[in-house]
Amino acid sequence: MNPWFTHTVCLECGHQMPPDIHLSTCTACGSQWLDARYDYEAVSKLWPSSIKGRDRSLWRYVELLPLGEPDVEITMGEGYTSLTRLYSYEQIYQHEHLYAKDERQGPTSSFKDRQAALSVMAMRRAGITECVLASTGNAGAAYAAYCARAGIKLWLFLTSLVPSEKMREAALYGAEVVKVSGTYDETKHVAAEFAKRKGIHLDRGAKAIPGKESMKSLAYEMAEQMTAKLGPDSTGKWRAPDWYIQAVSGGIGPLGVWKGFQELYQMGLIDHLPKLGIIQAAGCAPMVQAFHAGAETATPVIPKTLITVLATGDPGPAYGLLRDACLTSGGTMLAIEDGAAFEAMRRLASKAGFSVEPATAVAFAGLESMLTDGIIAPTETVIVNCSGHTFTAESHILGDQYVLDLQIQNGEKRTTQQTPAIHEGLDAAIRKLDEQVTSILIVDDNPTDRRLIKRLLQRYKRYRIDEAGNGAEALHAIRDRQPDCIISDLTMPEMDGFAFLEMLKMDPVTASIPVVVISAKTISADDARVLDQYSESVWTKGGFDTRVLVDHVVTMLGHSLDIEESGEVRAVRPLRRPDTGPLTSGQMISIVAVEDSPDDLRLIRKVLEASGPYKVFSATNGRDGLKAIYEHKPDLVVLDLMLPDMDGFAVLDALEHDHRLRDIPVVILSAKELTAAEARRLEQHAVLMVPKAQFNRDEFLARVKVILG
Ligand SMILES: Cc1ncc(COP(=O)(O)O)c(C=O)c1O
Ligand SMILES: [Zn+2]
C-alpha cells in the first residue's frame, strides 16, 4: 500500500475512513462514491524534482496513486502517452495552442488502459480471481487484457450494439463475453445482478477508488508535458492547460482529471485549474441537458445514438460532481450530433493524421464548435483527450461460441422510467443467461455421435458445448474451460473412458464434475463397479429415449426441460408457468379452456381435473374466453383456434398486448389445418400446438405438467 495515501472520504456525507482501496461503501451512509486522500504536503516536497528520472508511464506519479508500486507482472507501461500539437487545426481556426493527448497509444488503444491497470492490480491484491464488468466497449477490452495478465477470469457484459471487433478482441484475451440486447444501463443492471447471484466481484467503475484515481494520471502528465513544451510559467510552476475537453459517457475520465488538477493546484504545482469541456453525443446527453437546464441531478434518457461507446443514459451522481467542476472552473457542457461527429472524424484523419473512433471524434467536433462559437478564446491552451482508436481482432481463430447472446425481451414501449416490464425482461434474461453459461463437454471418438448428442441438447437448451475425441483431448479442453457436466464414451483411442474418468476423479479440481456415460460397450461387472463410483448414469448407445436422456442431463444441471419439440407438437419459445414461486401442496392450478364444442370442452375438463390439482374454467367463444382469462389470471390457457365471435388468433393477440397476460402459457388444441401464414402467426406467440386429430390423453397431460413447471 502507498504510505502517502492517508484516508478515504465519502463523497456524499464526508465521512472519513482508513486508506483502503478495497472499501466499497461508506461505513456511515452506505454511499458507494468514495475518494482517496493523500498527504499532499509531503508529496509537494517531492514533486516535481523527484519525478524527473522516472519511467515514462503513469507509475511515475506513484505517490498519488493508491496502490503504491505497480505489480510488475501486470503493468504494460500504461500512461505517458504523447501530447501532440494540432498544427493544421491551429491554422484553420487561427489559434495557437491546440493539443491532442494521444490515448490511442495505450496497450489496448484507449484511455481505459489506465483504469484497467489499476483496477486489475487492486483486484489481484485483494485475492479476487473472477470479476464482472459492464462496458460500452473500450473498458472491456482493456480489462480483458489486464485480467489475462493477472490470471483473473473476466465476465464482460456488452450491449449488442458494441462492434463485433471489440467483442472479439476481448474474447481473444480470454474474457467470457456476454452480449446483452438492451441499453447500456440495462446491461449494467444485468451484470450487477449476475455478479450478485454468482457471488462474483463486480467492478464499480467511477465509484471505486482505483478507477478514478487512475485517471488523475492524465492531469499530471498533461501538466508535465505542457511544461516541457512551453517551458515553466513565469512563477516556475508546471503549466495547466486552459481547457480540458473530453467526450463523456459515464464521466470517469473528467472526474479523475479534475481531481488530478485540483491536487496539483492544492500542492502549489499549477497556478490555475483548467476549464472542463464535457462533450456528449446529442442522442445521449443527459448531463448536457441537465447542465443547461440548471438542474442539480440529471434525468436518465434512453440513448438514441450510433456512438454506442457514449451510451450511458443514466449518469447518476457523476453528473452532480462534474456539474460542480464545470461551474467552479468556468467550463461548459455541449452536445454533438452523430453526423457532425463523423465529419469531425474524417477531418481529424485527413488534416491531422489521427484515425480515431466515433466516440473520440465527438470531443473533436466539440472542440471545433467551441472554437467557432468563441467559447474558447484565441490565446487559450486546449488539450483534447484523443481517447481511443479501434482495430480489428483476428476473427477466424475464435470459434463461433465466443459470445453469449442475451436478449432482454421487452415488448413495452421504452420510457425513461424503469418499467416493471423491463425488470421482468431482465429477470427472464438472467435466467436464460444461467443456461447459456452452462457448458458441457462431449467426449467421443465418433464425430457423428458427438454432433448428434450436441444437436439433441441444443435443440432444447442453449448450452455451450465443447467436444473432444478422446480422454487426453478432453483433459486438455477441461483445462481451457471447466465444464459443468461431461458426457463421455468409453471405447476411444489413446486414452479410453475409464482412464479418463480416473484422471478426472483423482484431480480435486475436476473430481466433482458430473459425468454421464453413453457407450456401445458391453459393461462387465468390473466396469459397472468403476462406473458406479465415477459416473452419474450409464446409457447404451441407440437404446434409450433421447428425451429422457436430455431430461436427465438438464435436471442434473439444475434446470428444467421447458422447451418442447418433437414431431407433431412444437413450441417456439420457452413455455413455463410464470415464476410466481413454488406451488404449495393443496394449492389449485387454474386453467382456462376456450372451446366452442361442448363435447371437447367436457373432455378437456375431465382429463385435466381427474389428473391433478387443476381447476378448469371454461368459455365457449373468444370474447368470453378473454374475459375469463382477465378474471382468473390462470396458470395455463387451452385454446381452440376456430371460435365464434373472436377467433383464437385474436385472443392470442389480445394476450400478447397485455403485459400481465403475456407470459401465460397457451396450448392450442385445434383441428384447423394451418396455412403457412397462420403457422407464422402462432410462432410469434409462446404456444404449444396440439392437433386435435393426434390428441393423446397421457401425452397431453405430460406436456401440461412440463409447462406448469
Ligand atoms: C474512446 C472513449 N472515449 C470517451 C469515453 C467516455 O469516457 P468516460 O467514461 O470518462 O465518460 C469512452 C468510454 O468508454 C471511450 O471508450
Ligand atoms: Zn457517506
Image (spheres, grey):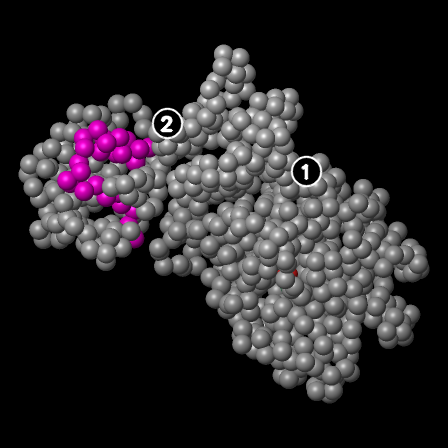
Q: Residues within 10 Å of mark 1 (few under 14, many from 20)?
A: some
Determine if residue 41 is in view.
no
| Chief SS of the magenta region | helix
The reply to whether the magenta stretch includes residue 700 is yes
Q: Position of residue 416 (x, y in %)?
A: 44, 59
Q: Quadrant of the C terminus?
A: top left
| Residue depicted at x 46% and y 61% | 302
Please, is residue 14 above or below residue 289 in the view? above
In the image, the segment drawn in magenta is 684-709
Q: Is residue 127 left or right of residue 548?
A: right
Nearest the viewer among 141 and 617 is 141
Q: Is residue 472 left or right of residue 410?
A: right
| Residue depicted at x 76% and y 42% | 19
Secondary-structure class at tag 1: loop
The reply to whether the magenta stretch includes residue 105 is no
Nearest the viewer among 354 and 218 is 354
Secondary-structure class at tag 2: loop
Q: Label 1: which residue? A: 128
Q: Label 2: which residue? A: 544
Q: Is residue 313 left or right of residue 354?
A: left
Amino acid at circle 1: Ile
Amino acid at circle 2: Phe
Q: Quadrant of the N terminus?
A: top right
Please, is residue 82 above or below residue 344 in the view? above
Q: Is residue 124 left or right of residue 317?
A: right
Q: Position of residue 190 (x, y in %)?
A: 50, 47
